Amino acid sequence: MRNLIFLNFLFLFSFQSNAQSLSIIPQPVSVEQQEGVFTFSPQVKIIYDKDVAVNANYLNSYLAKYYLVRPLIQPNIKKYIALRLLNSKQKVYSAEEYYLTITPDSVVITGSDAGIFYGIQTLLQLMPVESKMQFDIPCLNIHDYPRFSWRGMHLDCSRHFFPVEFVKKYIDMMAYYKMNTFHWHLTDDQGWRIEIKQYPKLTEIGSHRKETIVAKNFDPYIGDKTPYDGFYTQEQIKEIVKYAAQRQITIVPEIEMPGHSQAAIAAYPELACFGMSYEVLTKWGVSDVVLCPTPEVIQFYENILDEVIALFPGNYIHIGGDEVPDDHWKKSKQVTELMLKENIKTYAGVEAYFINTIEKYLISKGKKMIGWDEILDGGVSSNASIMSWRGTEGGIAAAKHGNYAVMTPGDYCYFDHCQSKNSMEPLCIGGFLPLEKVYSYEPVASELNSEQANYILGAQANVWTEYLSTNDQIEYMIFPRMLALSEVVWSQKAKKDWWDFVGRIQKQFELMEFRKINYRVPEPEIQLRPLEENKFTLGISSLKQNSDFYYTIDGSVPTSASTKYSESIVIALTPNQKVRAIAITKTGKKSIVVETVNN
């Protein structure tokens, strides 16, 4: 446990140094504070260049929803917010660059369409954490642009299905922190979630499983005996794609192949190598049943991709390619014949044959292929992009080979991992990924030279949902960790500072409550400083500074009815006696319970 006195000093220093500064996350490239304030009121108007009307309407709707202010949109007004496109004579560092200038009379955001949108997100973070019709924001000049072009968040909707409205909220949460790529995991062994009109059984059968494993009861297996289903229609997908585009977010769909495909095989058994019947998998893990690499199966998936491509206008299609067991292929006559015909020596080569055939088809349709780093094992073309999840090695190898890579290593970017080692933490898949470790991540490995570093597109957090079945659980797992990742992928490396981030995140906790986001309240830390026999000074602190702390020494679980902590409390403890504590916010949100033992 950290030394409490040192920790409190750092908190105090960080908070005081930021008290008069700005709670903007991710940290902008440059910020200059000026004298005075701009006052928001119903008299403020929005003016804009005609090509950024979507941004103007977005800002107008946000103000109406959260601040009861709906500015009229019209020209030639004294007090105004202006959204202006950069002209060709102005220097542009990137397509997402913006300038935000706030004076007592105006707020002017200048940039490309995307840049203006990100300038709006910065502006929104300057606003208060309560609904009011009139409020001030400080005058300042901001110039900003991102470090990386791929700033991603992933969501697995195969293991558990999430409704359209939550997917839209997820997109909104991403946009607020300038994330721009939504990796949508739509198919897996446990469910097929996208309507394909040519193959209706994919959703008629593949979207349904008869039950779901209870917690981690693998051996012996225990199911919940409750049927589970859900899928997105193509009309719903079009609606979500449009919604995301209005928030400068590109959706990358993932259609798993040749592994993680048992839901599809349950619908169409001929996709496997053997004439057997299969069911949608009800437990978590990797199925041994995989797609058979025959021309007929590849044609089947090319037909699927035709419909997927028509729905998603972005450059990339994710084809999975991870965790492909070869037992199914070892027993297959078709695979043996393929290996002889094509002179393929290994089963990794069989997968490469499948993946490379699919990639050629995607290229013929004007798309780029991206897959998990296993696709490197059998060899890929220089056009393929890699998502490095088994550590950083895949991304490093890709960049050295001239393939673009997105870094998403489990140790830093898997938001389904536990946020503490405390047994009170909600059920999670395992691992340990605290906020500070996410913030510490550097996507460009030291092994890469400057030319190779250009092949690192950015980084992404993955949210696998084996143990996340509700909207609130998803939000709990990504917040506040997504704020740390947003700074990793947007802010300049030299600007990153953990304690400065801790100071700036304080208002963000309040903004998350204001916007009804179920973030994880940072747990308290307890320290006992001996005074004399059996007497101790009790110290309790937390990353979230304005929480109240409650504690017990009788072994009971602390609540808001327990003793409230204040500084310099002296308590008497016998050997092995426990002190337990909880943090509770002003609105009643609670942290997990922590404890320490007098030993």
Image (tube, helix red, strand yellow):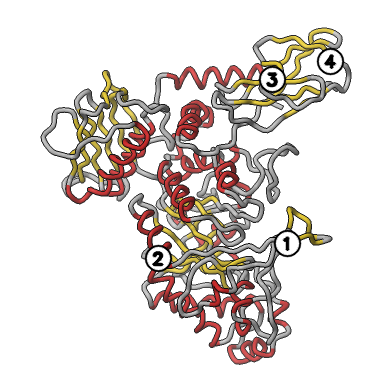
Residue of label 3: 561
Query: Looking at the image, is 514 positioned above or below residue 560?
Result: below
Q: Amino acid at mark 4?
A: Leu
- Farthest residue to the top: give it: 532
- Is residue 316 left or right of 109 when viewed as pictured? right
* Residue 284 appears in the picture as rendered: no
Residue of label 2: 235
Q: CA distance from mark 2 to mark 1?
A: 31 Å
- Farthest residue to the left: give it: 76
Give percent across and percent down for residue 254. 51, 65
Q: Quadrant of residue 158?
A: bottom right
- Precedes in sequence: disc 3 or disc 2: 2
- Precedes in sequence: disc 2 or disc 1: 1
Q: CA distance from mark 4 to mark 3?
A: 21 Å
Q: CA distance from mark 3 to mark 1?
A: 39 Å
Circle 3 packing at 10 Å, graded few (<14), some (14-19), many (20+), is few
Q: Secondary structure at mark 2?
A: helix
Query: Looking at the image, is 278 positioned above or below residue 387?
Result: below
Circle 1 packing at 10 Å, graded few (<14), some (14-19), many (20+), is few
Q: Quadrant of the C terminus?
A: top right
Q: CA distance from mark 1 to mark 4?
A: 48 Å
Residue at 71% over, 27% down? 1
Residue of label 4: 573
- Precedes in sequence: disc 3 or disc 1: 1
Residue of label 1: 225
